[in-house]
Every structure is written in structure tokens, then in C-alpha cells.
């Protein structure tokens, strides 16, 4: 053998050996039960404008769609919060006129009641896209415009009446009320504008007092702005202007909320305003891309978003945009054709469910670490059992992971994996024994695995 050929062969063997050693070394993930973090409120998606379309499907398809969104006993998104729209333009079309029976409102009530009854989902976030047109500076439901200050008392009373009607329809109060969707955007559809100062004036002077008088305990969230932009944008434009040196606003606002659009949509940095004023922060709307993508690659991108939001961003809730969408893009968790009433369930439904189905409201996020940049570990102390850990392998190689459940006083004897991959949807796998608070599991390339016990 020539010297160059020999060197080439030896080098190739060295590369193969090194790769085998690296694979054997695998990764170590540590979950620290002595480092509890934020309490999880849950995961959700919106039914605004589209709830009524559910009735156009066959009864069997309706059940499949809802199972795929809300079930906790079969592969699904496992959503635990429903986001609806208040439709105040339809509810209060003119001064003194109210129409609770408007189809857009009643279709949402029907969806919420059905999901509450069937799946036990009883958390409702209701967002206002626009106040009634006659209260606004542009006298229109769309194209932005601000509430005229003389109508602040009327708007507060309209919101309270809406919440009271919802309480009657749902048999409970709405959990969270968002004062305004994307308050800096003026769009051709329902929209309105608020500045931080306008939020402060309306919430502290009118909305909260009116809610207290009516005996409503619904939580208030602002600003639900469109662009997250990281804490440098959110805190300077919304968080601190709304709360800093505003003790009454601090007392009246329960939750900070943001959407996750814009160039910087990584959720892995916490809002300093939320931390300083001890406010839970929710990410309440996001989707990306205008061409349908139902692949595992798309699903892994959402696993990455949720991982960052929970583990280092300190977010307590994470929402996709629509639960269902008839446009053939990525706007909905489930995409449907509203001419022949067929539907598609993309992989992101199941990747999201690897978190939401097993990490229920009231779970406590735990500090985690991973020795591999490809293995993302997200853990909670669940409401039932002691282990709910999501391991997302963002690489193209299978990785063996040793998990240490540090400082867990009574570890389970085994954990059960549920795997989502290009060919699996939360597939239950053989239980893995736990010994000395540790277990080992192999995570295939481009997959999301939840282990529970």
C-alpha cells in the first residue's frame, strides 16, 4: 500500500472511531428539583372568527379535530387554554344597543362550552381586537383609531356586560381579559391603538373599578403587542412604561402579554419588567410562514420556541395563533379546506402536545441543563406524578442521554417515553427503569420525546 493511501485509510478510521466515541459519550441532562421556577398557566390557540366553521364538518370529523387539539388521553396538541375574541363591534354596534346573540360570539361560546364539557378545559383568555366603532376616533372597527376619552366609562361598562354575559353562558367567569390586541397596529381588519399612558388611564380609572363593582375577578392583561423583540424592545416600549412609577397600574394588571412576531422572536430572554414587578408573562400569538409546512422540521422549530420560553424566558403560557385555519398556510394548528371540508394535521400539533399534553396548568418549571447543544431539555414538576421532561433532539444524529433527577426525594421506579418523529405522533414506548434517580434513553435524530413518571 502506498504511503498516501495508508495515511488516508488511517485518517478515515480515526474519523470513524472519533464519531463512535462521541456517540457513545452521548449527553447528560440534569433536572434540579431544588430550583423551581415559574408556575405554568398552560398552552393555547385562538378560535376567533373561525369557531363557527367547526359545525360544517361531519360529526366524526368534528370529534377528530377537537380530540387533536384538546385530548390528554391520545396524541394531540393537548391545549389547556382557549383564546377567543370579544367582538365588541358586533356586541355593541351603537350606543345603548347590545347583541350577545351575534353568530361570531355564540359560535365561540358553543366551542368553549363543548371543549369544557368534553375535555375539562376551563381556562379562557378573551382578547378585544377593537372597541365599538362609535367610541373611536375614526368611527370604524378597522384601521386603528383610539378610544375617545369621553367613552372610557362606556367602554368599561360594555366590557363588564360582555364578561357578565359570558359568565352566564359558560357557567364561570372568563379567566383573563386582554384589553387590546396589538395596540400599536392599524390594520384593515379589526384594530385599535393604545399608548402605555392610555392603557394606564383606562385600566386604573375605569375598567378595573367597573369590574370590582360588578364582582368580577377576571384577570387583566396588557399590552398583547405584536412584536416581542426581546426584553430590549418589550421592556422599553411596553413593560416599564406601563408599570414603572405606576402603583395603581401595578395593582390592577395581573399578567403581561406579548405576541412573538418581528425579527427577534426568540423567547429565551426574560422580560426584566415582568421580573421586577412580579408579573407572569404570556406569549399569546405566533405563527411563521405563509406556505403550508407540516413537517417534523417545522415541528422542531416550535419545540425550540417553547423550550426557550419556558426554560430561560420565564414565560408562563405559550399560544399558537389559530386552532384551525382555512388558508393553506401555517396560520392554524390544523389546516382545513372550507370548500370540501377536509383537513390536515401537521406535525407541530404533536410536538406542541409533547409539552402541553403532559405539562398541565399548575405545573412548576424546573431548572435543567444539557451537556449537548443539540439536546434541549425542558422539565416541570407536574400536577400528577413527579416527572415530565421533554427532550428535543435538534440534530441529524441519534443521541443517548443520561438523565439525572437531582434532588428528587422519591423518584419513580420507571418513566414512560412518548415520541414524535417524522413517522410517529406521541407514540408510547416501553417504560424505562429509573435507578438512583437516573435513567438512560436514546433520542433519535429530529425527534421530540416526553418522559413522564
Image (spheres, rainbow, N blue to C red):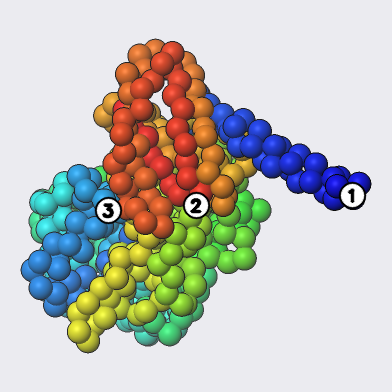
Residue placed under numbered mark 3 in the picture: 76
- Expressed as whole percent of the image width and height from the top left, the position of residue 299 reads 44, 58
| Dot placed on the residue nearer the N-terminal end, 1 or 3 | 1
Q: What's the distance in space between the residues labelled 3 and 2, CA to CA?
A: 19 Å
Residue 262 lies left or right of residue 338; in this view the side is right
**What residue is drawn where x is 41% and y is 35%?**
389
**What residue is drawn where x is 25% and y is 73%?**
343
- Expressed as whole percent of the image width and height from the top left, the position of residue 241 reads 58, 54
Q: Label 2: how many residues lie within 10 Å, few (<14), some (14-19) or many (20+)?
A: many
Asked if marks 1 and 2 touch (Cβ < 8 Å), the reply is no
Q: Label 3: how many residues lie within 10 Å, few (<14), some (14-19) or many (20+)?
A: many
Q: Residue furthest front?
A: 1
Residue placed under numbered mark 1 in the picture: 2
Task: Name the element at disc 2.
Answer: loop
Q: Of residues 227 and 220, which is closer to you in this image?
A: 227
Q: Label 1: how many residues lie within 10 Å, few (<14), some (14-19) or many (20+)?
A: few
| Dot placed on the residue nearer the N-terminal end, 3 or 2 | 3
- Expressed as whole percent of the image width and height from the top left, the position of residue 333 reads 34, 64
Quarter residue 419 falls in: top left
Quarter residue 91 falls in: bottom left
Specify whether residue 186 is in view. yes
**What residue is drawn where x is 33% and y is 23%?**
414
Residue placed under numbered mark 2 in the picture: 446
Q: What's the distance in space between the residues labelled 1 and 2, CA to CA?
A: 41 Å
Amino acid at each position: 500500500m502506498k504511503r498516501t493511501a495508508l495515511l488516508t485509510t488511517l485518517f478515515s478510521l480515526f474519523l470513524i472511531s472519533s464519531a463512535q466515541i462521541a456517540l457513545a459519550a452521548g449527553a447528560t441532562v440534569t433536572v434540579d428539583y431544588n430550583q423551581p421556577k415559574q408556575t405554568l398557566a398552560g398552552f393555547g390557540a385562538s378560535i376567533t372568527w373561525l369557531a363557527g366553521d367547526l359545525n360544517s364538518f361531519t360529526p366524526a370529523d368534528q370529534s377528530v379535530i377537537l380530540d387533536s387539539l384538546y385530548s390528554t388521553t391520545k396524541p394531540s396538541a393537548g391545549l389547556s387554554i382557549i383564546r377567543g375574541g370579544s367582538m365588541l363591534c358586533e356586541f355593541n354596534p351603537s350606543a345603548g344597543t347590545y347583541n350577545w346573540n351575534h353568530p361570531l360570539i355564540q359560535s365561540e361560546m358553543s366551542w368553549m362550552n363543548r371543549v369544557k364539557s368534553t375535555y375539562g378545559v376551563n381556562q379562557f383568555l378573551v382578547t378585544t381586537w377593537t372597541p365599538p366603532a362609535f367610541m373611536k376616533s375614526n368611527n370604524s372597527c378597522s384601521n386603528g383609531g383610539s378610544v375617545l376619552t369621553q367613552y372610557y366609562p362606556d367602554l368599561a361598562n360594555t366590557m363588564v356586560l360582555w364578561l357578565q354575559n359570558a359568565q352566564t353562558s359558560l357557567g364561570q367567569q372568563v379567566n383573563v381579559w386582554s384589553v387590546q390586541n396589538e395596540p400599536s397596529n392599524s390594520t384593515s381588519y379589526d384594530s385599535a391603538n393604545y399608548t402605555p399612558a392610555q392603557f394606564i388611564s383606562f385600566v386604573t380609572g375605569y375598567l378595573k373599578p367597573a369590574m370590582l363593582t360588578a364582582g368580577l375577578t377576571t384577570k387583566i392583561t396588557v399590552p398583547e403587542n405584536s412584536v416581542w423583540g426581546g426584553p430590549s424592545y418589550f421592556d422599553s416600549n411596553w413593560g416599564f412604561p406601563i408599570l414603572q412609577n405606576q402603583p395603581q397600574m401595578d395593582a390592577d394588571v395581573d399578567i403581561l402579554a406579548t405576541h412573538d412576531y418581528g425579527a427577534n422572536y426568540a423567547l429565551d430572554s426574560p422580560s426584566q419588567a415582568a421580573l421586577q414587578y412580579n408579573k407572569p408573562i404570556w406569549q399569546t400569538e405566533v405563527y411563521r410562514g405563509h406556505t403550508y409546512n407540516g413537517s417534523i422540521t417545522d415541528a422542531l422549530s416550535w419545540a425550540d420556541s417553547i423550550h426557550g420560553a419556558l426554560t430561560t424566558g420565564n414565560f408562563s403560557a405559550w399560544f399558537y395563533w389559530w386552532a384551525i385555519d382555512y388558508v393553506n398556510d401555517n396560520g392554524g394548528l390544523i389546516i382545513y379546506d372550507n370548500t370540501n371540508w377536509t383537513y390536515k394535521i401537521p406535525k407541530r400539533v404533536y410536538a406542541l402536545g409533547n409539552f402541553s399534553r403532559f405539562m398541565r396548568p399548575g405545573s412548576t418549571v424546573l431548572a435543567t441543563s444539557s451537556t449537548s447543544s443539540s439536546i434541549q431539555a425542558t422539565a416541570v414538576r407536574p400536577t400528577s406524578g413527579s416527572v415530565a421532561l421533554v427532550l428535543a433532539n435538534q440534530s441529524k444524529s441519534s443521541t443517548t442521554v443520561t438523565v439525572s433527577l437531582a434532588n428528587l426525594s422519591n423518584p419513580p421506579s420507571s418513566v414512560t417515553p412518548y415520541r414524535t418523529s417524522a413517522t410517529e405522533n406521541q407514540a408510547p414506548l416501553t417504560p424505562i427503569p429509573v435507578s438512583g434517580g437516573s435513567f438512560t434513553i436514546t433520542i433519535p435524530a429530529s425527534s421530540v420525546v416526553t418522559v413522564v413518571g
